[in-house]
């Protein structure tokens, strides 16, 4: 039973305080994830300083309509973090003007994309039709319970990052061979173990994939290889195994794997392949869901499957 919710309008102040504190905690989690040393409670004061080319304590207080001690406390914390500094006013030497430090300007550059995502996420959460503020709060807090505010912000940041930096997908180059090995070995050790067949293929991509008419694709972001996938010819003519898909740990959640899969499907259709086949494990529920989303259907696993860990086989007709 949510007592505050049950109080109705008379509990409005406490409800608003609870929502505010929740959003501050969740925002702090986002800052922590991206190694941003900042306190969300300092945002209003810092934003005023950022927007003006020199501002006084009194001007901040008047702009935010808060108490002078509250402004002074925020300024002292920003000074301690070395995000601002004080200088004398050119006209009145007794007056101290607050400006951003070099560290403060660098923080602005790093945190602005996060602020943009926070703002957009708040808009998404508060796009509510209601007959009263209490009803609005009821719906808002239910949304927070369904998906944490911090999770929604992080998802928006990730998707925005991919769009801004234009993920590129390139074909195999010899200098990418070590990335092909490293990404897949890390993935296998995280979720399963490295089988002898894995080690052999990953150590010799030219011999087992490229030289046999196969293809390897690499996801490149900011000149860094962050994901890979292969199309390996099978015994059945014009049928390829979609295999060796892996994404670096710090880039998971960006839907890079899905972009690599779409690249393989598009490529298979362009090359008039008959179908794509993949081996997986029902342990990977999210992966199986995505395979089905892209049209793969389950077929029987042969007794001499090349992978011990595989307990599901799927195919997608592309011709």
Image (cartoon, helix red, strand yellow):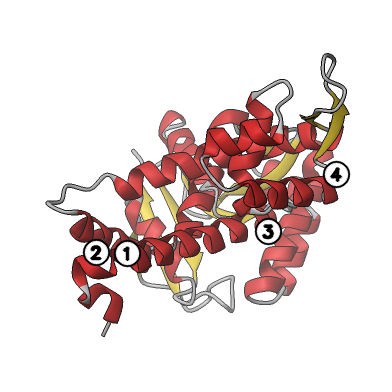
Give the residue displayed 21% in from the left and 65% down from the top. 9
Query: Which residue is more in the foreground, 81 or 217?
Result: 81
The correct choice, above or below, for 48 with respect to 245 in the image is above
Q: Earlier in the sequence, mark 1 or mark 4?
A: 4
Look at discs 2 and 3 and give the one toward the viewer.
Answer: 2
Could you tell me how far apart the alpha carbons at marks 1 and 4 are, in whole angstroms?
36 Å
Q: Earlier in the sequence, mark 1 or mark 3?
A: 3
Q: Residue 288: name its quadrant.
A: bottom left
Neighbours of disc 2 within 10 Å: few (<14), some (14-19), many (20+): some
Q: Earlier in the sequence, mark 2 or mark 3?
A: 3
What element does badge 4 sit on? loop
Picture disc at residue 138 = 2
Picture disc at residue 82 = 4
What element does badge 3 sit on? helix
Query: Which residue is more in the foreground, 177 or 90?
Result: 90
Could you tell me how far apart the alpha carbons at marks 2 and 4 are, in whole angstroms?
40 Å
Q: Earlier in the sequence, mark 2 or mark 4?
A: 4
Could you tell me how far apart the alpha carbons at marks 2 and 3 are, in whole angstroms?
28 Å
Give the position of the C terminus as an image quadrant.
top left
Neighbours of disc 1 within 10 Å: few (<14), some (14-19), many (20+): some
Look at discs 1 and 3 and give the one toward the viewer.
Answer: 1
Picture disc at residue 96 = none
Find disc 3 in the rendering and name its residue.
32
Look at discs 3 and 4 and give the one toward the viewer.
Answer: 4
Give the residue displayed 81% in from the left and 28% down from the top. 95
Q: Residue 301: name its quadrant.
A: bottom left
């Amino acid at each position: 039973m949510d007592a505050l919710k049950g109080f109705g309008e008379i509990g409005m102040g406490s409800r608003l305080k609870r929502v505010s504190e929740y959003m501050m905690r969740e925002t702090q989690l986002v800052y922590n994830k991206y190694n941003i040393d900042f306190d969300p409670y300092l945002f209003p004061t810092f934003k005023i300083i950022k927007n003006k080319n020199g501002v006084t304590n009194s001007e901040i207080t008047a702009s935010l309509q808060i108490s002078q001690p509250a402004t002074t406390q925020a300024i002292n914390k920003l000074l301690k973090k070395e995000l601002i500094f004080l200088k004398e006013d050119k006209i009145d030497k007794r007056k101290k003007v607050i400006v951003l430090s070099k560290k403060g300007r660098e923080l602005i550059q790093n945190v602005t994309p996060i602020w943009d995502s926070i703002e957009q996420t708040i808009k998404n959460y508060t796009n509510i039709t209601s007959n009263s503020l209490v009803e609005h709060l009821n719906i808002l807090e239910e949304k927070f319970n369904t998906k944490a505010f911090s999770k929604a912000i992080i998802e928006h940041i990730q998707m925005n990052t991919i769009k801004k930096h234009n993920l590129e997908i390139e074909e195999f180059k010899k200098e990418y061979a070590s990335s092909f090995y490293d990404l897949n070995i890390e993935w296998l050790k995280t979720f399963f173990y490295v089988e002898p067949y894995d080690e052999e293929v990953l150590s010799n991509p030219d011999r087992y994939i490229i030289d046999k008419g196969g293809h390897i694709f690499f996801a490149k972001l900011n000149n860094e290889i962050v994901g890979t996938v292969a199309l390996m010819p099978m015994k059945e003519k014009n049928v390829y195994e979609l295999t060796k898909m892996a994404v670096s740990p710090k880039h998971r959640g960006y839907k890079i794997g899905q972009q690599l899969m779409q690249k393989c499907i598009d490529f298979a259709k362009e090359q008039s392949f008959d179908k794509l086949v993949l081996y997986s494990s029902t342990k990977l529920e999210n992966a199986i869901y995505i395979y089905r989303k892209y049209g793969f259907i389950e077929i029987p696993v042969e007794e001499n499957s090349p992978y011990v860990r595989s307990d599901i086989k799927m195919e997608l007709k592309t011709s």
